[in-house]
């Protein structure tokens, strides 16, 4: 079974255009991988690899978007677990602050893209104390946002009925990559995102791509994706108050994520991630 998938991958590397035209081959490889997993058991790591290793281990430089000055570095890795994978991220800043993120992803035969099961993003001061933290448990519907200032801790919690397309943090890149790969970008992608803004909120977001983009920080022709909240009628009034993300992807390298402009956290410092190359 996995020889078939490996062969399909070789086709993708040797003739990318053929691979794009024959999407049925990818769909068949995915379906067969799911069937083998559910009928034969073991090899969950193999199945997770088919889905999640599209997000390869990657290192980033963190820049001040206004000056271009390097202010830190980060990396993301994927660790296989029985039910799927853990997407882990670390960011270290030159002033001593650092962040840690862990997103648990699960794989089911009903979904072509891994689903988020839990999310945790912790922001540390240089002395190791927690400045703020966001957590969500998709299974139980619980979300928490914690901040600590001047020794005073505040925790806000809320219960949600998380839709199946809910993501948070770096995990949002996975459905966006799938959206780009499917090539149906004439219509924006709509997802739900858990975020601390500043309390726990479930937002609907819209991702819209524009191709043929050049970016001075990375070579080649890239695709830019703007991620904005979607409040329907209230967009004009509410969008200015909610963080936005602009991300760049490389279509020549399997839609790898190569950089983004975003806020470190809600109303926090603006940062620019640039993939090391």
Image: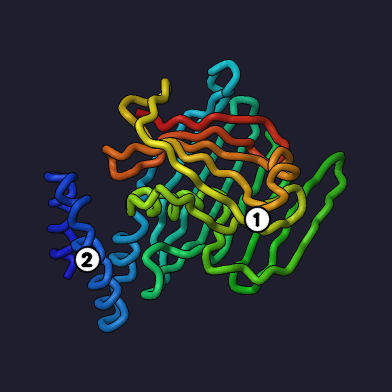
Residue shown at 31%/40% (left/top)? Answer: 251
Q: Is there CB contact under 8 Å for labels 1 and 2? A: no
Instruction: Tell me if residue 182 comes above or below residue 116 in the rendering.
Output: above
Residue shown at 57%/23% (left/top)? Answer: 65
Instruction: Tell me if residue 266 comes above or below residue 193 in the rendering.
Output: above
Label 2: which residue? 29
Neighbours of disc 2 within 10 Å: few (<14), some (14-19), many (20+): many
Q: Which of the image's four quarters has the N terminus?
A: bottom left
Horizontal and vertical percent position of residue 102: 54, 54
Horizontal and vertical percent position of residue 109: 36, 75
Q: Which mark is residue 203?
A: 1
Horizontal and vertical percent position of residue 110: 39, 74
* Closest to the observer, 223 or 134: 223
Q: Which of the image's four quarters has the C terminus?
A: top left
51 sits left or right of 26 in the view: right
Residue shown at 66%/53% (left/top)? Answer: 232
Indicate the quadrant where residue 45 lies. Answer: bottom left
Horizontal and vertical percent position of residue 238: 73, 45
Q: Label 2, secondary structure: give it.
A: helix
Instruction: Tell me if residue 265 comes above or below residue 121 in the rendering.
Output: above
257 sits left or right of 166 in the view: left
218 sits left or right of 101 in the view: left
Q: Which mark is residue 43?
A: none
Label 1 or label 2, whichever lies nearer to me, is 1
Can residue 231 be seen here?
Answer: yes
Indicate the quadrant where residue 160 lies. Answer: bottom right
Mark closest to the chain's N terminus, 1 or 2: 2
Q: Label 1, secondary structure: give it.
A: strand
Instruction: Tell me if residue 125 comes above or below residue 15 in the rendering.
Output: above
């Amino acid at each position: 079974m996995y020889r078939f998938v490996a062969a399909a991958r070789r086709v993708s590397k040797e003739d990318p255009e053929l691979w794009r035209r024959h999407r049925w081959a990818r769909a068949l490889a995915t379906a067969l991988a799911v069937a083998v997993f559910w009928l034969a058991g073991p090899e969950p790591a193999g199945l997770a690899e088919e889905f999640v290793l599209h997000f390869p281990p990657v290192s980033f430089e963190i820049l001040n978007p206004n000056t271009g000055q390097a202010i830190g570095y980060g990396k993301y890795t994927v660790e296989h677990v029985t039910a799927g994978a853990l997407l882990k991220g670390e960011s270290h800043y030159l002033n001593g602050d650092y962040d840690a993120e862990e997103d648990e992803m699960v794989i089911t035969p009903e979904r072509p893209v891994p689903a988020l099961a839990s999310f945790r993003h912790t922001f540390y001061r240089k002395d190791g104390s927690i400045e703020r933290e966001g957590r969500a448990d998709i299974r139980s519907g619980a979300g928490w946002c914690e901040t600590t200032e001047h020794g005073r801790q505040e925790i806000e919690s809320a219960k949600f009925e998380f839709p199946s397309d809910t993501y948070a943090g770096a995990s949002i890149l996975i459905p966006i990559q799938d959206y780009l790969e499917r090539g149906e970008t004439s219509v924006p992608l709509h997802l739900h995102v858990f975020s601390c803004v500043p309390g726990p909120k479930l937002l609907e977001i819209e991702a819209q791509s524009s191709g043929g983009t050049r970016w001075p920080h990375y070579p080649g022709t890239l695709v830019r994706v703007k991620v904005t909240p979607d409040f329907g009628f209230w967009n004009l009034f509410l969008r200015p108050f909610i963080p936005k993300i602009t991300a760049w992807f490389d279509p020549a390298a399997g839609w790898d994520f190569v950089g983004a402009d975003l806020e470190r956290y809600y109303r926090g410092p603006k940062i620019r991630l640039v993939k090391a190359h």
